[in-house]
Image (cartoon, coloured by chain):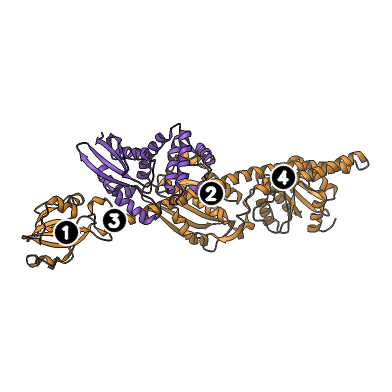
Chain colours: A purple, B orange
């Protein structure tokens, strides 16, 4: 995965447990600053090792940690260097998710080794919609749940996210939403 | 074959379309037009809102039909340009528009992906521009983090170096006292073999202990930033791209240099590190757009470098504490930046002060001694005359200045035993008073033997001032650690002192006794 994922994990972790504890995590996971360069590509196994170490120290099981990190990723992307791209992609959650593939395509054009997932809005109803998530990676279902919950927060929506189908084609999520205060 | 499109299809295909009649009155328009140009209303005339690139085309509207001429519209009220084609359909004209293929950066503000047709080639351009912006922002953030880490590391090294230096200095001073008194003891008890042996052991031990102190200083001091002479204006001009890279968007950094040819002797990296710290502080104090100015000028014997900004400035309380290590007004500040600037300035005989900018914001003023003017330093007001007896004219007159009273007494006594007339002073001010007193009695000192780092002044500055009053005065510098100040070809004696070396040096300068 790209190093910006590692940077986001670090930021989430430091916000909760501080820089000293992150330094301890670096020692335990055998990583250095060289493993946290935003636009460098790292082996997925390294990313998972960092997340596993973070989960232990945050007192979370891996699935909860992935969901929490998914939620944080939206906060991270929405306030940093990618803020402008996030804004350009859409002003509401459904438009945003509909445009994500287009945005990811431009990322791949620049970062050619990136393996980007696909998000398709399948069904729109009153106060809900469903999304199909496709990826070459496995085991990130909880992370996607966190991402979608993060998007609800980002667009000031109140609601919930549930994984409703885990099939060979991909993962299908249902998102309930209404305007927040 | 013709396709019938309802307004929803039209809106999806061309979010920026405008439908006009043959008189150019607006019949309808797409969602993107509505969002980006909220003043537009149905029934308005097209040219009330847009400048048309080829207005003659519009006059020919009734006769164009199949060839779909291209058109460009520029909004009269917003930085928005759109290009497209005109499609005629039953007496109405569809302006199938898209934002300009290479949009002006100002046009990207507020633009969303949904404002463009999915097939619009400018969509990819805009995304790539935004991706590029994100990468540049990441690179700048990384550069700022690296700078901050380097500053922390430099500040830590400086602290270790300073503590080691102080330890070595004090240690060597005390060793000097022991050694000189051991020599006195050995001389006074020359017929007592046992005492002479003990004194010899004491002297040897102080020599070995001194070597340990020296190695401590060597280990802790940075060897990478050697002092060298340079013209500050030239370094600033050459470093402008680097200094600009420290600022964020919307902050203008300008140089106002008025010290051409003025030379200082400093570590260049340390000099730039000082400016880096001050610029980063200024950037943090500027919300949104602002301006940072670096100016230089000469003031008597000083090169003055000022870094000013028009940011929020600092309150009185913050100004008072600004140079304290670990004090910071920033949430994530280390509190070491200004402390390291002050360290650097002190170590180079300069000063730094932080002031409110007369207009708004803050101003940091750095004053560096100019090297060619060091010898004219004579601003040390003498103390009242001491009234000490001035010795016979056939004895060379030596002035010894050392803040360590026991070392001073021992050295004075030992040199007197060697046949010199010796006057002692425990501070530079006292020393300069004696120089003046001896000069007025027409018995100027022949040599000055001075410590360097003293609580009430600096021996190098004293030596410059004394030589300005007595140009023939020979100077010997002694210290627990070799001074970094600009020092002409004056002999340096490392403490703890060996009396033989002191007398040998005096003999070399003044002639044998």
The residue identified by callout 1 is B96
Dot 4 crowding, Cα within 10 Å, few <14, some 14–19, many 20+: many
State the residue lying farthest toward the right.
Answer: B191
Q: Nearer the viewer, residue B502 or A85?
A: A85
Chain ID at mark 4: B
The residue identified by callout 4 is B213
Q: Residue B397: in sight, yes or no?
A: yes
1 or 4: tag closer to the N-terminus: 1
2 or 4: tag closer to the N-terminus: 2
Q: Nearer the viewer, residue A30 or B251?
A: A30
3 or 4: tag closer to the N-terminus: 3
Q: Could you tell me if the residues under marks 2 and 4 are in contact, i.e. CB atoms within 8 Å? A: no
1 or 2: tag closer to the N-terminus: 1
Q: Residue B342: in sight, yes or no?
A: no
Query: Is residue A181 shown above or below B361?
Result: above
Q: Quadrant of residue B409?
A: top right
- At x 32%, y 43%, the residue is A170
Q: Nearer the viewer, residue B495 or A35?
A: A35
Q: Could you tell me if the residues under marks 1 and 4 are in contact, i.e. CB atoms within 8 Å? A: no
Q: Secondary structure at mark 1?
A: strand
- Separation (CA) of disc 3 from disc 2: 36 Å
- Separation (CA) of disc 3 from disc 1: 22 Å
Q: Which mark is residue B160?
A: none
Q: Nearer the viewer, residue B384 or B399?
A: B399
Chain ID at mark 3: B
Question: Percent position (x, y) of residue B133?
Answer: 36, 54
Query: Is residue A111 shown above or below B164?
Result: below
The residue identified by callout 2 is B150
- At x 79%, y 55%, the residue is B505
Q: Secondary structure at mark 4?
A: helix
Q: Quadrant of residue B177?
A: top right
The residue identified by callout 3 is B106
């Amino acid at each position: 995965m790209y190093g910006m994922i590692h940077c986001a994990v670090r930021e989430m972790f430091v916000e909760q447990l501080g820089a000293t504890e992150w330094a301890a995590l670096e020692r335990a996971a055998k990583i250095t600053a060289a493993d946290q360069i935003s636009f460098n590509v790292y082996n997925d196994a390294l990313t998972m090792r960092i997340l596993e170490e973070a989960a232990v120290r945050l007192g979370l099981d891996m699935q909860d940690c992935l969901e929490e990190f998914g939620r944080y990723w939206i906060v991270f992307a929405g306030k940093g260097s990618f803020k402008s791209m996030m804004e350009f992609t859409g002003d509401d959650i459904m438009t945003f998710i509909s445009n994500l593939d287009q945005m990811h395509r431009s990322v791949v054009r620049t970062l050619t080794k990136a393996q980007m997932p696909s998000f398709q809005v399948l069904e729109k109803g009153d106060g809900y919609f469903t999304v199909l998530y496709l990826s070459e990676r496995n085991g990130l279902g909880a992370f996607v749940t966190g991402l979608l919950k993060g998007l609800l927060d980002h667009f000031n929506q109140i609601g919930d996210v549930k994984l409703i189908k885990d099939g060979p084609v991909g993962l299908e999520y249902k998102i309930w939403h209404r305007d927040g205060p | 074959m013709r396709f019938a499109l309802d307004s929803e299809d039209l809106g999806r295909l061309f979010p920026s379309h405008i439908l006009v009649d043959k008189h150019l009155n607006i019949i309808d328009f797409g969602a993107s037009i509505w969002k980006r140009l909220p003043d537009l209303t149905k029934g308005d005339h097209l040219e009330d809102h847009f400048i048309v690139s080829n207005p003659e085309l519009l006059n020919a509207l009734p006769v164009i039909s199949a060839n779909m001429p291209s058109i460009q519209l520029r909004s009269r009220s917003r930085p928005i340009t759109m290009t497209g084609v005109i499609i005629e359909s039953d007496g109405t004209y569809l302006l199938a528009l898209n934002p300009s293929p290479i949009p002006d950066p100002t046009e990207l503000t507020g633009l969303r992906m949904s404002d463009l047709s999915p097939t619009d080639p400018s969509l990819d351009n805009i995304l790539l521009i935004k991706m590029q912006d994100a990468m540049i922002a990441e690179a700048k953030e990384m550069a700022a983090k690296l700078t901050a880490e380097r500053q922390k590391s430099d500040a830590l090294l400086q602290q270790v170096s300073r503590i080691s230096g102080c330890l070595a200095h004090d240690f060597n001073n005390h060793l000097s006292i022991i050694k000189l008194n051991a020599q006195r003891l050995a001389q006074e008890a020359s017929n007592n073999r046992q005492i002479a042996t003990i004194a010899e052991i004491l002297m040897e031990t102080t020599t070995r202990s001194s070597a340990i102190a020296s190695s401590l200083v060597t280990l802790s001091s940075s060897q990478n930033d050697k002092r060298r002479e340079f013209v500050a204006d030239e370094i600033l001009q050459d470093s402008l791209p680097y200094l600009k890279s420290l600022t964020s968007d919307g902050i203008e950094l300008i140089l106002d240099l008025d010290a051409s040819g003025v030379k200082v002797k400093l570590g260049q990296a340390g000099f730039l590190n000082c400016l880096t710290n001050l610029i980063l502080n200024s950037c943090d104090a500027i919300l949104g757009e602002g301006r940072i100015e670096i100016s230089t000028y000469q003031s008597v014997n000083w090169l003055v470098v000022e870094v000013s900004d028009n940011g929020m400035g600092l309150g009185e309380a913050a100004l008072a504490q600004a140079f304290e290590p670990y004090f910071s007004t920033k949430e994530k500040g280390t509190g070491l930046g200004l402390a390291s600037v002050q360290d650097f300035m002190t170590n180079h005989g300069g000063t730094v002060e932080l002031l409110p900018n007369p207009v708004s914001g803050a101003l940091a003023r750095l004053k560096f001694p100019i090297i060619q003017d060091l010898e004219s330093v004579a601003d040390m007001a003498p103390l009242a005359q001491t009234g000490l007896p001035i010795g016979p004219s056939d004895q060379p007159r030596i002035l010894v200045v050392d803040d360590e009273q026991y070392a001073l007494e021992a050295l004075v006594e030992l040199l007197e035993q060697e046949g010199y007339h010796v006057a002692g002073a425990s501070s530079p001010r006292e020393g300069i008073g004696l120089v003046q007193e001896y000069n007025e009695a027409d018995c100027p000192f022949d040599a000055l033997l001075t410590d360097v780092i003293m609580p009430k002044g600096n021996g190098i500055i004293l030596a410059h001032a004394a030589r300005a009053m007595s140009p023939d005065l020979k100077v010997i510098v002694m210290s627990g650690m070799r001074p970094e100040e600009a020092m002409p070809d004056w002999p340096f004696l490392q403490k703890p002192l060996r009396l033989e070396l002191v007398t040998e040096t005096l003999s070399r300068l003044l002639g044998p006794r």
